[in-house]
Each structure stands twice: as C-alpha cells, then as structure tokens.
Image: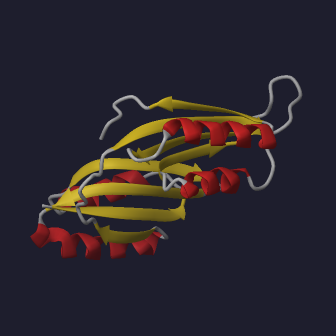
C-alpha cells in the first residue's frame, strides 16, 4: 500500500464528496484523513488515501476524468519520514482583524523552525461592536530542541504588538 495526498478544488455543488469517495473505493483505496470546506463558492479540500501500489495509476487517471465536472485534483505520493522527537502545541489567536496577522505569526514560528500542522481561520463579528475579529486556531509541531517558554514569550510579545489574545497549550495526544 502507498499513501497519496490529494488536493481538490472546484465549483461547489452537491455530490463532490460522493464522486471522490466513489473513485477511491472503486480503486481499492482507503480514505484515511481529510479536511474539506466551502470557500467563496468553491469546494476545497485535502485528502489522504492509501491504495494498493498497483492501483495508484488507475486512481490518478480516474481523478483526471473528474475534471469534466470542474473539479481539479492534484495527486502526490507521500514519502514516509521518520518523526523527530517533538511535541504538538495549539495556538488560539483572537483579535481585531487587519492585514498581515497570519504573516506575523508564521514568521515567528518559522524563526523557531516550528512546523504548522494545521491552520484554521475565520472572521467572526465581535459580540458588542460588530467589528470584524480575526480568529485562528493553529496546531504546531515544536522540535524538542526548541525552548517552548521562549516561543510562548515570543507569542506574548507579538500579542501585545498585534493587540490580540494568544493562548499556547499542549495539544491533546501530543508527543508524536
């Protein structure tokens, strides 16, 4: 078996997940993990499947045929990597929305060689004022060699500069 990572994008309409799952099942694949969303009228997603090595080419060809419906699928073979000693942390960020917030947080994380494993953002309205807020939930993998207290201090400094609230907590099931 090999693992394939798929990225999907196209016009949103009912039946997309069914079409994709049908291709996976018809080629002996197993749907392992996915993240899918409706964004600005588009369906966007990432998907991890495992498939028998001898069926991978047929699976890719079947996904090519889905382009007729407007769904673009990119298939990448996953290469197993040995996990270094590290721990998972979650960052919860909430503040007034303005351009550049994601860049400033990601720059800090990159400086510590911290990998962003999952990022989810949205723009809810503030309860009392109706102003647009920026909310991000970030799951990161911090190498064991990185001082978590230094990362926390950096995030707190950034929070003061950005006028946002930041929480950094140990992720459930941490210690990959």
Q: Residue furthest top?
A: 128
Question: Which quarter of the image is occupied by the C terminus?
Answer: top left
x and y percent of residue 109 in the render? 57, 51
* Residue occupying the point 79% across, 54% down: 99
Which residue is more in the foreground, 5 or 41? 5
Q: Is residue 57 left or right of residue 34?
A: left
Q: Is residue 82 above or below residue 131?
A: below
Which residue is more in the foreground, 122 or 55? 122
Figure quadrant of residue 22? bottom left
* Residue occupying the point 52% across, 55% down: 13
x and y percent of residue 75 in the render? 34, 70
x and y percent of residue 83 in the render? 27, 52
Figure quadrant of residue 53? bottom left
Which residue is more in the foreground, 80 or 143? 143
Q: Is residue 67 above or below residue 143?
A: below
Q: Is residue 39 left or right of residue 9?
A: right
Figure quadrant of residue 131? top right
Question: Which quarter of the image is occupied by the N terminus?
Answer: bottom left
Residue 123 visible in the snapshot: no
Which residue is more in the foreground, 125 or 156? 156
């Amino acid at each position: 078996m090999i693992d394939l990572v798929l990225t999907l994008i196209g016009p949103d309409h009912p039946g997309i997940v069914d079409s994709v799952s049908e291709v996976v099942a018809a080629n002996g694949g197993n749907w392992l993990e996915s993240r899918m969303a409706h964004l600005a009228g588009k369906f966007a997603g990432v998907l991890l499947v495992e498939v028998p090595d001898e069926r991978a080419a047929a699976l890719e060809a079947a996904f090519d045929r889905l382009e007729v419906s407007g769904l673009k699928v990119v298939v990448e073979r996953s290469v197993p990597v040995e996990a270094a000693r590290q721990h998972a942390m979650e960052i919860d960020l909430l503040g007034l929305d303005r351009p550049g917030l994601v860049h400033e947080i990601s720059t800090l994380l990159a400086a510590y060689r911290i990998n962003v494993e999952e990022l989810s953002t949205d723009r809810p309205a503030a309860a009392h004022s109706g102003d647009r807020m920026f909310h991000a939930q970030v799951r990161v993998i911090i190498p064991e060699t990185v001082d978590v207290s230094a990362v926390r201090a950096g995030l707190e400094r950034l929070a003061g500069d950005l006028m946002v609230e930041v929480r950094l907590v140990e992720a459930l099931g941490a210690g990959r």
